[in-house]
Image (spheres, rainbow, N blue to C red):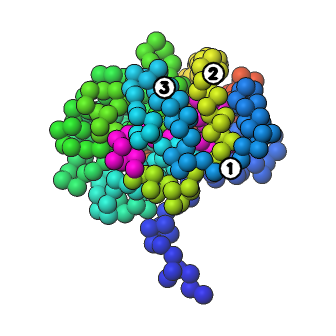
Amino acid sequence: MDYNSLVNSNVKRIKPSGIRKFFDIANEMDDVISLSVGEPDFHTPWHIREEGIHTLEKGRTRYTPNRGFLKLREEISNYLKRHYGVWYEPDAEVLVTVGGSEAIDLCVRSLVNPGDEVLIPEPSFVCYVPITEMAGGVPVIIETKPENGFRLTAKELEEKITEKTKLLILPYPNNPTGAVMRREDLEAVAEVVERHNLMVLSDEIYSELTYGTAPHIAFSSITGMQERTVLVNGFSKSHSMTGWRLGYAAGPKEIIALMTKLHQFAIMSAPTTSQYAAIEALQNGDDDIEYMRSQYDMRRRLIVDGLNAMGLKCFEPEGAFYVFPSVKSTGLTSMEFSEKLIYSKRVAVVPGDAFGACGEGFVRISYSYSIKHITEALERMEAFLREL
């Protein structure tokens, strides 16, 4: 049978993620130190796991409401108000999803019509462009620059807007660069957004992993932006709950209603056990977040200092748990550097161009690993550079 004539051409032309290549290579080799995966190395805190276990023991395994338990949506609203000063109506403006990735997909499909342009700052997470294309939208890339701290500037945004622009994706704190947007940056972007009547998908999955004295600022907390913004977040990074597959979206009730409709027919509801565990995480997990953030901060300083000392110029990340050093001084492309490193020294990193063409000349390194793990990887990388 000729399946090529049957499949969706939008899906067919999408390339597999470059991240998976090095993850798969690392799994097939012995003695590999992988710094390629963006997953916390902490176990989900015990009190959260215990709540999940308890609900299973009690047989609480039935379907939940499509939007998620009302109690969970209330706790999400309380959490956003407590941490970021923005409140959402639990009954109409919050949707519980299967991870933050589903929330991103639902938002794009709800807002984007065929031919609409979606502005995507890069380097950034690998899913935005494929999801836009599958919805029939047109990705328009905004290349952020190291000299601007990989922040999106109002000028860069303005230059890419056309009469077809519908949506801006705002991925901060950023994967892979670790860049963050401070209040003054967001206010400048907000002015452009309002003037051009745009909607914003603010992916804030790394919001709790912001370092230094300045806190994370939710884009919807900027004056006039709550009615224009769908905030996406979840529990994978903040509470080390990647395998529980739980995220959420908060936004205008009209948009959340459309997203819920898609969610209802494609997924129906997020996992029941995960929702009970998430309620516990939101009610009693703030200390867990603070502990993990302090550990990541220590690792962040170790790896940035180590990379700069060996000659790989490294912008200092202020959020998430990634560094994005330049490898241009080696004369190798991002792919060549990553391949030679894993095969010669058994250290896995991700080529920067996996996160957009402007990532060429960089590699992404995750520091969501132990100090011992990171220290050994840095020693191997230094030996690799000496041998080049």
Viewer-side residue, 19 vs 61 = 61
Marks 2 and 3, the one that precedes in the sequence: 3
Q: Is residue 328 left or right of residue 195?
A: right
Q: Which residue is mark 2?
A: 284
Specify the amino acid type for callout 1: Arg
Q: Which residue is mark 1?
A: 62
Q: Is residue 185 left or right of residue 247?
A: left
Helix, strand or loop at mark 1: loop
Q: Which residues are magenta?
A: 234-257
Percent position of residue 264, x then y: 51, 56
At x 40%, y 46%, the residue is: 256
Q: Which residue is mark 3?
A: 78
Percent position of residue 29, x then y: 79, 48
| In this rendering, the label closer to the viewer, 1 or 2 | 1
At x 51%, y 80%, the residue is: 6
Callout 2: 10 Å neighbours few (<14), some, many (20+)?
Answer: few
Does the magenta run of residues contain 23?
no
Callout 3: 10 Å neighbours few (<14), some, many (20+)?
Answer: many
Specify the amino acid type for callout 2: Asn
